[in-house]
């Protein structure tokens, strides 16, 4: 029982200043919830109950910066998604944790049910004709691809990835934690080898802050966001102080109505 | 006022179904462009769906289990409430050119999909896989809503697919059915409705067909004995892979039966979607 005598203490939580002990303590709670989201994803309903989901959790200033920069690099590879990637890179920096969920069967061990979802055919030929195979076994060793994802994929498996993402998000909602799934985060995460066995990966940003960092954003959000504005405030005010400098031991300027008091 | 617990719990399934649909439409999307539709079916309107499942049950073991569960509960006066969760996933407006569909660009995919849209054994395609994820998230939220209210439920391809064949929600391509209740444990899992509906030999036969490797003898000789009985070494059996052209005959018969059911029920079901 001696150990229980040590079960005492106090914990202070506050999200400002960022990465202070009180903020990191808060982030640690979000990390625990992100792990619960991962388990929610693992237990989601899948076709035939087959295990097919892998997860990867990423957190920490350096790791998030690396991911955000990868997204910014990818932003300029497609004009249709340039703004999306740039805006969502900001959200990566502002999130508390990132959950990647991937399906490691959708390109290699499909459902084989002829469901028709991938190509509208009743025999899975759309998938198999688009892949290297022998006797129905898919050869995935050639991973070269001109597109971010090497398709075609088994869409029934991709649908199950949707269930996994859904259950993770549901878990977040139940914990009153903000979470949102992103294509951009998933594609960039794949490039960084998160969920390394999966052909399709969704990235879920998770945050437990006063303001949900994934909604209500400004136009040109990569330029007008909290990080940038705080930094320009630091830049501006420091110089502003030097403009009207004085020796406050000798004299402090007062409002006219307060002079002589 | 006094209410029977059994009666109100059965009635309440409809309210839970509404919560499921609510969660389905509210679910977060990655594309923000995925078109979702939903309907709720119960009571006598389940009959065409049950009959379609009954036809398919003749050639598909898993569908037989769903058919028996729907039918026994309908016959007992406690029909499940079926939430139909449909979506159209066949067009990509995003221009992300991600390649997951097998085409290098969304434009090429859209052109192919427009010219080749067709149905498989359950759903229609081709599909944009980001929309497939959106659809999966939404279906998951519908099921999670049911679970939140502690209602026995199961995400199904078959009840959704036959409803689509009967004409529910035209213009969609993905079809999921989510039956709710009746309100007791073990309706759609460890199904109590299957009590004494099949034999031990039926279950073993299913394992023999689906997991033959599990019953394989020593493989070193190149042709392992298939252990299909306790004293398997006495009159050895072997696995043989052969094409059986007539195997499809039963399928064609079932397809004809289903076509008749669509002729019988389809016009009434489809009438709702006729423009005035």
Image (spheres, coloured by chain):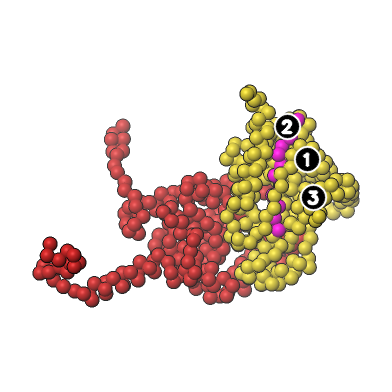
Residue at label 1? B46
Left or right: B166 as drawn, with respect to A40: right
Q: Quadrant of the N terminus of chain B?
A: top right
Displayed quadrant of residue B190 = top right
- Residue at horizontal 65 percent and vertical 47 percent from the top: B21
- Residue at horizontal 33 percent and vertical 69 percent from the top: A233
Chain letter for mark 1, please: B
Sequence order check: which comes first, mark 1 or mark 3? Answer: 1
- Residue at horizontal 63 percent and vertical 70 percent from the top: B95
Whether B85 is among the magenta residues is: yes
**Residue at disc 2, secondary structure:** loop
Residue stretch in magenta: B77-88
**Residue at disc 3, secondary structure:** loop
Residue at label 2? B78
Chain A in the picture: what colour? red
Q: Whole-Å distance between the Cαs marked 1 and 3?
A: 16 Å
Q: Quadrant of the C terminus of chain B?
A: bottom right
Residue at label 3? B272
């Amino acid at each position: 029982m001696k150990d229980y005598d040590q079960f005492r203490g106090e914990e202070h939580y506050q999200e400002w200043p960022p990465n202070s002990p009180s903020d990191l303590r808060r982030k640690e709670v979000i990390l625990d919830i992100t792990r619960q989201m991962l388990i929610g994803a693992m237990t989601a309903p899948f076709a035939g109950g087959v295990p097919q989901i892998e997860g990867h959790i990423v957190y920490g200033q350096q790791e998030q910066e690396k991911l955000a920069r990868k997204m910014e690099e990818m932003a300029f590879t497609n004009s249709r998604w340039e703004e999306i990637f740039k805006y969502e890179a900001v959200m990566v920096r502002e999130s508390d944790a990132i959950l990647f969920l991937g399906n490691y069967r959708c390109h290699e061990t499909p459902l084989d049910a002829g469901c028709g979802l991938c190509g509208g055919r009743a025999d899975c030929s759309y998938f198999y004709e688009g892949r290297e195979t022998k006797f129905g076994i898919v050869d995935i060793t050639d991973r070269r691809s001109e597109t971010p994802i090497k398709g075609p994929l088994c869409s029934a498996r991709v649908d199950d990835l949707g269930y996994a993402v859904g259950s993770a998000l549901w878990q977040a909602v139940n914990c009153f934690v903000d979470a949102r799934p992103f294509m951009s985060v998933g594609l960039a995460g794949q490039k960084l080898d998160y969920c390394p066995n999966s052909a399709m990966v969704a990235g879920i940003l998770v945050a437990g802050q006063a303001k949900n960092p994934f909604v209500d954003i400004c136009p040109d959000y990569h330029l007008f966001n909290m990080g940038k504005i705080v930094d320009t405030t630091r830049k501006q005010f420091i110089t502003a102080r030097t403009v009207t400098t004085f020796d406050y031991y000798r004299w402090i300027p007062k409002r006219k109505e307060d002079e002589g008091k | 006022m006094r209410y029977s617990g059994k009666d109100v719990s059965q009635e309440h399934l409809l309210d839970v179904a509404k919560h499921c649909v609510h969660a389905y439409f509210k679910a977060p999307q990655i594309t923000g462009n995925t078109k979702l539709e939903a309907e709720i079916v119960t009571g006598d309107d389940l009959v065409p769906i049950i009959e379609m499942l009954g036809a398919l049950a003749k050639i598909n073991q898993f569908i037989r289990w769903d058919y028996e569960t729907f039918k026994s509960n309908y016959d007992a006066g406690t029909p499940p409430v079926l939430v139909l969760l449909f979506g159209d996933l066949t067009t990509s407006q995003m221009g992300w050119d991600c390649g997951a569909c097998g085409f290098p660009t969304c434009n090429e995919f859209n052109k192919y999909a427009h010219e080749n849209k067709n149905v498989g054994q359950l759903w229609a395609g081709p599909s944009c896989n980001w929309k497939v994820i959106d659809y999966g998230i939404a279906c998951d939220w519908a099921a999670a809503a049911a679970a939140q209210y502690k209602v026995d439920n199961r995400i199904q391809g078959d009840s959704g697919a036959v409803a689509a064949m009967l004409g529910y929600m035209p213009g969609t391509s993905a079809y999921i059915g989510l039956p709710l209740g009746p309100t007791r444990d073990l309706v759609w899992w460890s199904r109590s409705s299957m009590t004494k509906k099949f034999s031990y030999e039926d279950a073993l036969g299913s394992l023999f067909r689906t997991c033959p490797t599990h019953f394989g003898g020593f493989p070193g000789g190149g042709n392992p004995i298939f252990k299909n009985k306790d004293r398997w070494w006495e009159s050895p059996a072997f696995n043989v892979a052969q094409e059986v052209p007539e195997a499809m005959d039963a399928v064609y018969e079932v397809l004809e039966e289903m076509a008749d059911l669509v002729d019988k029920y389809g016009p009434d079901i489809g009438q709702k979607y006729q423009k005035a």
